[in-house]
Structures are given as structure tokens and as C-alpha cells.
Amino acid sequence: MDQDITAAREKFLNRDFDEKTFAIPAEKTIEYARLCGETAPRFLDASHPEFQAPPTYIASLSGSRSLPEGFPRFGLGMDAGKGVECFLPVRPGTTITGRTHLHDIYSKTGRSGRMVFAVSRMAFFDADGQHLANADSRLVMREKS
């Protein structure tokens, strides 16, 4: 692994750098579900006994920062994808807290040169501290040649 990537991993991985609270309004989760083409009543009907936000809804929530202060700029950054991991349902009408940390930093070399990837993970918790879900955002930075 490249020395600068190793140094960045040692300094920045698995350290929370942002925390934000989110209200989860039923109207927004229902509209989100409808726009995604969802048909399951548990996502569309607030009176359903298992009413919940669609699993991908949390990927629409963002913190105040995408990278920690002082994170090195390896080059021009672009979105490289999202991922969601659900553990428990996110219930509309509640408030959840998202805590963000860098989950991974790695590099790949291709025809255009080295690309550095940073995976920013927002972990979501309910008011009781239960871990509901993770939303990963990948950023790719292509080094200038």
C-alpha cells in the first residue's frame, strides 16, 4: 500500500468527524417510497402496523461534512457510489442520529493512473442508541498526472 494512503488510514479511519440529527417525517418517507416505485403497504400506509421508511431512504440523508478536516486532497473528487446496510427499520415520526467516520481509504491504479477511494460511513442510531443502519458514500479522487 502506498505510504500516503497508509498515513491517511492511520490518521483518519474509524474516527467520528460529524454528527447530525434527523427528523423522519412520514410524508417524506411515503413520497420517497412512491417516487421509487415502491408498492409494499408497510412503506406507503402510515396506519400499517409495520410502517417504516424504505431501506434506501437513509442514503438520502447527509451530514454537514463528507470528509474530516485536514483530509489530504489526492486529486479531483467524484462520486463513486452509495451503499446501504440495514439492521432495524427506520420508523417515520421518530428522530435518528447519524455519526460519520471514514470506513476505508484505498487506492487502485488503472490506465489513467492512481485513483484514491475514500468510503465515508454514516451510522444511524435511534433515541435508545440502537444501531439502525449504515449508509456508505464512496468518493474517488483521480490524481493529476
Image (cartoon, helix red, strand yellow):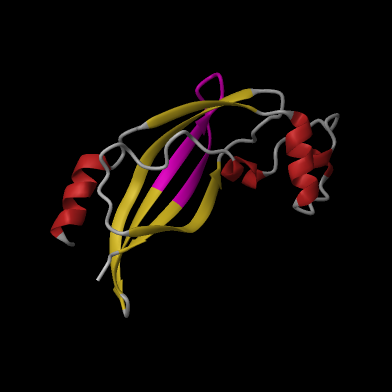
**Residue drawn at (21%, 55%), measured in percent from left and top?**
5
Q: Nearer the viewer, residue 81 or 79?
A: 79
Residue 117 forms part of the magenta stretch: no
**Residue drawn at (81%, 30%), measured in percent from left and top?**
49
Residue 112, above or below 116? below
The quarter of the image holding the N terminus is bottom left
The quarter of the image holding the C terminus is bottom left
Q: Residue furthest bottom?
A: 111
Q: Answer with left or right where residue 6 lies relative to residue 49.
A: left
Tell me residue 94's x, y (percent). Answer: 66, 23
Tell me residue 62's x, y (percent). Answer: 53, 38
Q: Main secondary structure of the magenta part?
A: strand
Q: Answer with left or right where residue 71 lies relative to residue 90.
A: left
Quick check: can you spot residue 51? no
**Residue drawn at (70%, 38%), measured in percent from left and top?**
53
Q: Nearer the viewer, residue 57 or 18?
A: 18
Residue 135 forms part of the magenta stretch: yes
Magenta segment range? 120-137
Q: Residue furthest left?
A: 3
Tell me residue 69's x, y (percent). Answer: 30, 36
